[in-house]
Amino acid sequence: MTSGSVRKKILLFALPLFLGTLFQQLYNTVDSIIVGNYLGSSALAAVTSAGNLIFLVVGFFTGISVGAGVVISFHIGARDEKKTKEAVHTTAAIGIAASIMMTAVGVIFAPAVLRLMNTPPEVLPESIIYFRVYFAGAFGLVMYNTFVAILQAAGDSRSPFFFLLAASGINIVLDLVLIAGFHKGVGAAAFATAASQLFCAFLAMMKLLRTEGSTRLVLREIRFYPGLLKRVLHMGLPTGLQNSIMAFSNVVIQTYINAFGEQAVAGIGAYTRVEGFVFIPIMGFTMALTTFISQNLGAGETRRVREGIRFGIVCTLVSAECLGMLLYILAPEAIGLFDRTPEVVAYGVARAHYVTPFFFLCAFTHIGSSVLRGHGKAVSAMNVSLICWCVVRILFLAVLDPVLHTIILTYIVYPITWTISSAVMTVLLIRLLKRPVGQQT
């Protein structure tokens, strides 16, 4: 990452991330398509209504992994093998502790939290089953993200792609066998996802065990190294909190959506599955740019950092808006893949038509966060999400819903808050990039 063509390095690193995220999103979507077509609208609503709540917990721990990757990338760029090794094994130790915590939280508190979200009574039992089975297999999910953060920090985005390709096949086959073949319920869909993630984690671990150099994983050396633990948490906690903040606001919005009934939950849930495909380039470029910035700052290559930022922003905004417009046009057909009930399709299409024209604003906030994070300013990125994507959204709905009580409020809250966050992010980036070249760490 610290030499050669900036554009080529970013694109070559981002491409496997695109493809890996594509297959991950594909098997999540196939989950919902199979559930919706074989188990009906209630089961589809159960699976999709749990999605935001799952990401609330999962996002926190995966965010810590992302922050750890920034630290590892920096030390790789600085060619400090000792600190790189300590950061790698500290990250692995955090992953093990996090997986235990996440399993306990998910299994124990699922019923209470789903009830707080006003999950429709006809959906609640299946939502609880899905949630508990999913989190019973949390070890695979957390450790996969932990190991992948290490691989990506070292510049390896290809291996995770092949791991996800294999996991996608396993997940789809299990879904077809258990749900379409044996007519099992939503618990089978959660089991298929958990099993495929565990397989991914195993493959990633084996890759690290066989890797040469400072990023090699040695099981007996997995522990918390105090100096590195502090730095990893300093970067990882804000990133984890940022993910959870975004998920929390979506959980609150989901609570308002739940009040409009099962068909609204199913339709909007189906839309969010499709929307995930549009966010593939956004997530790919943000992950690539964070690693690129961290390694080059570690190596003192700040001029490459500026060139990478400009290129990353243009690529992300253009790809997000083009795919957003495509989804605007194809929304009826896309939602219909999950459930052809007219009311379900109508809810999903309405959500698409209100939010997709503004995807470039969402993309700008994400890419801006990756720039701040790569510069070690994860707290600033977190604060933007906290204020704009959480506080403002919650206040908007709390004030207007009692007066208007229309589901349209849950649609327009997204472009409104994306606009605000983009304005704030513009100010932060201008301040950051106005600094002299040698002072951007």
Image (cartoon, helix red, strand yellow):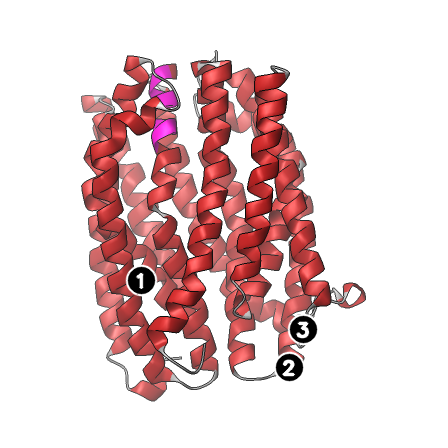
On screen, residue 296 versus residue 128, left or right, reads left
Pick whichever of labels 1 and 3 is earlier in the sequence.
Answer: 3
Q: Main secondary structure of the magenta part?
A: helix
Q: Are marks 2 and 1 in contact (CB under 8 Å)?
A: no
Q: Is residue 99 above or below residue 187?
A: below
Disc 1 to disc 3, how far (Cα)?
Answer: 29 Å
According to the picture, the residue beneath numbered tag 1 turns out to be 368
- Residue at 27% x, 50% y: name it: 320
Q: Amino acid at mark 2?
A: Glu
According to the picture, the residue beneath numbered tag 3 turns out to be 86
Q: Amino acid at mark 3?
A: Glu
Q: Residues within 10 Å of mark 2 (few under 14, many from 20)?
A: some
According to the picture, the residue beneath numbered tag 2 turns out to be 81
Q: Residue 276's spot in the image, x, y percent?
A: 38, 41
Q: Residues within 10 Å of mark 3 (few under 14, many from 20)?
A: many
Q: Is residue 418 above or below residue 117?
A: below
Q: Nearer the viewer, mark 2 or mark 1?
A: 2
Question: Is residue 424 one of those drawn in magenta?
Answer: no
- Residue at 45% x, 28% y: name it: 48
Asked if one can make out residue 418 in the rendered structure from this viewpoint, the answer is no
Q: Residue furthest right?
A: 220
Q: Nearer the viewer, mark 2 or mark 3?
A: 2
Q: Residues within 10 Å of mark 1 (few under 14, many from 20)?
A: many
SS at circle 1: helix
SS at circle 2: helix
Chain part drawn in magenta: 263-271
- Along the viewing direction, whichever of 31 and 136 lies nearer the viewer: 31
- Residue at 35% x, 47% y: name it: 279
On screen, residue 111 versus residue 22, left or right, reads right
